[in-house]
Amino acid sequence: MEIIIRADTESATKLAAVLIVHALLAKPHTVLGLATGRTMERLYAFLSETNRENGVDFSLAKTFNLDEYVGIQATHKGSYRHYMNHHFFDKINIDKRNTFLPNGTAEDLSAECAEYEKKIREFGGIDLQLLGIGRDGHIGFNEPLSSLQSRTRVKALTPSTIEQNSPLFENPSEMPRRAITMGVGTILEAKKIICLVTGSSKAEVLAKAVEGPITSMVTASALQLHPKCVVIVDGKSASLLKEKKYYDWIFNNEPEWEPYRANKQQDGITG
């Protein structure tokens, strides 16, 4: 795991977007694992801008989302399919037939979960997985006590998650109590992972996830096991990290990060 601390939310989000773009430029057929939530909205705006203004091509990419609510149609404004179309897919040149989310209204949810795992394997696995971290430390909807070897399955959502997400629904009472989510084990099989964390409300859980013990109570802590995981954070979310000077030294001195230290790579994506 490597931790990169940027001064503010904008620069942290832009760096995550640049890393995703560079993955696409290196491999146009990249299979992306995608996340939702407030943190990702600005990132998807950056990526949409690169498509519109810099000609970054998404036409050959494939995407798999982490999760989807159980019991609401894809057309529902609270669904993650609607979120992805609204914030990203409708704004780039991607073939929507190559954008996959679990079907939360499937008649047989267990079969749907197994089919989702199969489909990921058929596309050769996820090349680059994008993640955020929930306030209780979950990745995807892998709530506390989720097995660190878990696969795609239906999970009951915690009261904390329901409280955090229900304001995103026009009628908060419509917030589902269950979701289909990639498992922690599924996520860890991605070849590379980018985890974007911003804001002071995530400072405590970020410190637990990256500097604390690996525990199923904070499923994001399992990212410590991944050989190619980059955690990009802003100053506010990094406020409780103990080794900030060390993380800064690595980013400012290791050759692999030199292209991303230059302002031109932060302010504009040139390929």
Image (tube, rainbow, N blue to C red):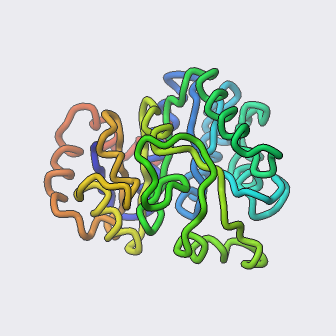
Q: Is residue 179 above or below residue 201?
A: above
Q: Residue at x 59, y 61 (%)?
A: 37
What is the x, y in percent for residue 245?
Answer: 14, 57
Q: Is residue 127 above or below residue 205?
A: above
What is the quadrant of residue 62 in the picture?
Answer: top right
Quadrant into which the N terminus falls:
top left
Q: Quick check: can you spot residue 271?
A: no
What is the x, y in percent for residue 120?
Answer: 61, 29
Q: Is residue 152 left or right of residue 207?
A: right
Q: Is residue 73 above or below residue 184?
A: below
In depth, the one of 232 and 21 nearer the eye is: 232
Q: Is residue 177 left or right of residue 22?
A: right
In depth, the one of 24 and 83 nearer the eye is: 83
Q: Quick check: can you spot residue 42?
A: yes
Q: Is residue 263 left or right of residue 185?
A: left
Q: Is residue 12 left or right of residue 151?
A: left
What is the x, y in percent for residue 128?
Answer: 49, 34
What is the quadrant of residue 167 in the picture?
Answer: bottom right
Q: Residue at x 67, y 67 (%)?
A: 177
Q: Residue at x 37, y 52 (%)?
A: 232
